[in-house]
Image (tube, grey):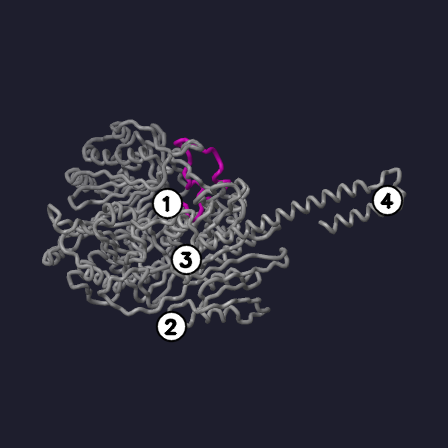
Amino acid sequence: MTTDGHRPSDAPVPTPGRRSVPEPGTVTVTVTFAGTYRSRQAVVEVRGPLPTALLGAVTAPADPGPPEVIVGTGPTDGAPGSPDSLRLTGRATVPPDLVGPLADQLTRPPAPAPAPYAPHTPYALHGAATTGSLETFAATPLQRDVLTDALIHPDHHVEQLSWRWHGPLDTDRFTAAWQSVFDRETVLRAAFVWDPHPQVTVHRHIAPEVVRHPHGTFSGRAALMEHERGRGFDLRRPGLLRAALLDGAPPGTPGNPPPTYVLLTYHRALLDHWSVHTLLREFYRAYCADGLLPGGERRPDLRDYVRWLEAQDPSAARDFWSREAARPAVCMPRAASGAVTGRSGTGRTRVRLTPDNAVRLAEWAARRGITESVAVHAVWAMLLHRASDAGAEPARVRFGVTVSGRGIFLGDIERTPGPFAGPLPVSVEVDPRSTVSGLLRALRDCALDVSGYEWVAEGQIRDWLAREPATTDTPAPSDASGYSRESANSRESAKSGDSESSGHSESPWDSWGSWDSGAALTESLLVFEQRTHGHDGLGADLAARGVRVDAPDISPARTPVPISIVVHHDDQGGLVLTSVHDRARLDDARAGALLAHSAQLLRELPETEGQPVTVAELLDGLPGMDPPRLHERPGAPSGPSGVLTTLRAAAGPRAGTACLVITPGTPAFWLTALIHGTTGAHAVVALHPTPYGTRSCVTEIRRYLRTADGHGPLVLAGLSGAGAQACDIALRLAEDGGTPPPVVLAGGGADAVGALAHAIESALRRTQAGLDRHRGNSDALSAVCADERQEAAMAEPSPANNADDEAKLRFQEALEKKTRAT
């Protein structure tokens, strides 16, 4: 084990064929259902250590009528000297409407005990304790957007900063310095809870996770970055920023002393790029002061920002975006139905403008009264128009831009870390016959218009437009993110049409109300990271300790859009453009060409000064290429949304399906570990009740079972907190008859994933055995009925002897015998 509680990179990964066995400290609950629809009861099986206080609460009399509880207790399995935990292997019969909350309560992890504060001890997040919650408040609209997408795509919104540390690195001082920053900044001690809407909870104390890997643990910095990205975050636990160190070659290696690679991994639900640089400057100050920062908590902080948001009147912003929505825009053309890229995952490509080119661009932009970011916007708008096949005709294009979110009247917001930077949609008409100067002026004005609404989130815009009378006749129901969402039928109607569209296809904004709450409003995103202040003159203090640090390099997070372009200045003065694209939706070559063409146009823009160069003339200098086409997501469900996703196909017919109910805050590594750790040939699918709702989940499961080839038994499963939704879905699946599928939960132990995998396999085996028994009984019953039908046919009187009483009696006896057998 590493110091962070995870297996090192060379540790063996569980392979299929090895049965998972739960550890003694894990609680598992299996819920099965018995009886008919009107007299149904739920049977709860509990295995694992259960606090005696919770056992008393569960078995306490209830009104009306206590549940029947049959519990077998064994020896204490808790820690030595801890008599408050009993090993249970028992069953309880409870009403169906109580079973979900009961299962969640039984598997809920116990609250961590307070730990002494030791600032110089290198804590790891999963091994450290927190000391209570300081305050809980509502998540911001931007955070709700991020959480909604991260719930469905856990690999999104995980960003990284890395740099080289030259000279000695004292791990204790490094950790103590970060501890001082954590103590000062409430955002670093924050996590999320759902009640049922997302809320931010701030803990009083949390120890930072700092892990130092010896040389050779990973093949290089890229491997370490990939490892940390793959771990993801549990959004329900504080500490959504962690540090990993990778030592260079050992002493004695020829050449200069090798540097240590430093990697910060963080989640954009709590921190943006500017915030992490602010925290990094604080860290350097603390490191140079022997790990201590003067002063107390920073104010203002995220709590003050939330209060400021609540005081804003959204009327002007709502009017602005309603006008913007009335303007149709072109989209990227779609690939033919069924066409695939043959790739998956995230593609990252970089190009760089030399310092000379970057300086020329900045000086040219300043003389024209625009910023470098406006120049980037103009280049992207021209490329989108070119890709749309609009030809020489004017057309409006739309794309997202990330705004800082700090252009508000809140004191010291510039130095306040938090999740403020977010995407907003902009649109502009591109006329190939007009001048580049005219396009630049239009985008400058657009940026000024949007700057007044930097505090607005895309989810708010979707919500406002979904409520417009022109888009829907009735108010759309609210989902778990707090945003309205239209019915599945309206979404299907809005999305119907040809599978391949031309470059003149209408933008998704043409029917804003048909968008799902988690959908992006644009197909591309531009991020221009502003220059940061480095270590604010602390270079001399670091040098006094023999330390020199490079400027951090950003590895951008993946976003919900098919492609995003992130632009930043490096420490040599160059301008770096990084594309991050969904390889399943956009071909690697097309994404690379878009990035290369962007860099070429940025180099050529300063050459247009003093000349009335048109958009068409500037684009004519680019090499020819096939227009990029967006592909459908592979494996996307046929339903109106991403409610159900296939994670692993069954290895054979009738192998069964484990349906994982994903709740808010489910860590990314959980799905990966469960897929690798579970055995058997059954399929594994992921179900997302939030934000789509229980009814959509039931519809998607039924559709999946109809299309699956001999699907076999079904088991719903999840971690603690998914019980209420999973049991509700199971009961609704049997509304039209039949028996609800079993539900399995795990939690409260160090190996919840392994325990859940073991419980899933047990439930699938028992369910399959029950199906086999039912099938055998049905076959026997069919045989009996066939015999009785033959006997009845032989005993049935002919029309000629219809009046024969003896024949009538024999016929009646045969029917009664058949009825009894049935």
Q: Element under label 3?
A: helix
Q: Check whether the beta carbons of the residues at disc 2 and disc 4 lie within 8 A of each other.
A: no
Q: Is residue 342 above or below residue 48?
A: above
- Alpha carbons under labels 1 and 3: distance apart: 29 Å
Residue type, mark 2 in image: Gly
Q: Check whether the beta carbons of the residues at disc 3 and disc 4 lie within 8 A of each other.
A: no
Residue type, mark 3 in image: Ala
Neighbours of disc 2 within 10 Å: few (<14), some (14-19), many (20+): few
Neighbours of disc 4 within 10 Å: few (<14), some (14-19), many (20+): some
Going from the N terminus, do you reach mark 1 or mark 3 first?
1
Residue type, mark 4 in image: Ala
Q: Is residue 403 above or below residue 76?
A: above
> Foreground residue, 637 or 7?
7
The residue singled out by tag 1 in the image is 560
Please check the rendered image and state whether residue 337 is part of the magenta-colored stretch, yes or no. no
The residue singled out by tag 4 in the image is 807
Residue type, mark 1 in image: Pro
Q: Check whether the beta carbons of the residues at disc 2 and disc 1 lie within 8 A of each other.
A: no
The residue singled out by tag 2 in the image is 81
Camera-side mark, 4 or 1:
4
Going from the N terminus, do you reach mark 3 or mark 4 first?
3
Instruction: Answer with left or right where residue 723 lies relative to residue 524.
Output: right
Q: Is residue 146 visible?
A: no
Going from the N terminus, do you reach mark 3 or mark 2 first?
2
| Magenta residues (range) | 492-521
Camera-side mark, 2 or 1:
2
Q: Element under label 1?
A: loop
Numbered circle sitting on residue 752:
3
Where residue 506 appears, x then y in whole percent?
A: 42, 36
Please check the rendered image and state whether residue 495 is part of the magenta-colored stretch, yes or no. yes
Q: Element under label 2?
A: loop
**Picture residue at 57% right of the left edge, 63% below the top:** 93
